[in-house]
Image (cartoon, rainbow, N blue to C red):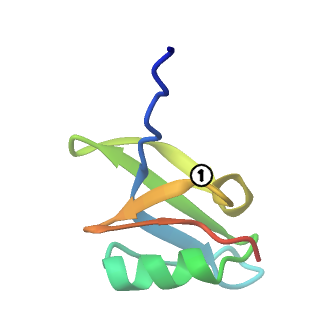
Amino acid sequence: MAKTKKEEPIVISRYVETIDNWGRTTSSRQPKKIIAALKDMTDDMYFEEEQNGMLMGSHDADSLIGKLVKVGETVFRVPEQ
């Protein structure tokens, strides 16, 4: 019997959102704010992934739908909008 690979969560450490037509942004590293943003995403957001304290890349909102993520100590699957 083949072993099933366990899905590892994507560790999200920060979100950034463009807030106006001039390119101004707002961002946060607070888990509570990141979780709220993941549950109510817009196309103007991206999320930064971190592993072992290093930035591993960023994800746009659509690429995280249905994925398992970890923010702080909370692990959950990103809902569809």
Viewer-side residue, 61 vs 69: 69
Q: Residue at x 71, y 85 (%)?
A: 20
Q: Residue 33, percent across and down?
A: 42, 84
Mark yes or no: residue 38 visible: yes
Dot 1 alpha-carbon crowd within 10 angstroms: few under 14, some 14 to 19, many 20 or more:
some
Q: Amino acid at mark 1?
A: His
Mark yes or no: residue 25 visible: no
Q: Residue 31, percent across and down?
A: 33, 77
Viewer-side residue, 23 vs 77: 77
Q: Residue at x 51, y 55 (%)?
A: 68
Secondary structure of residue under mark 1:
strand
Viewer-side residue, 77 vs 16: 77
Q: Which residue is mark 1?
A: 59
Quadrant in which the C terminus is drawn: bottom right
Q: Quadrant of residue 24?
A: bottom right
Q: Residue at x 41, y 42 (%)?
A: 8
Q: Residue 41, percent across and down?
A: 66, 77
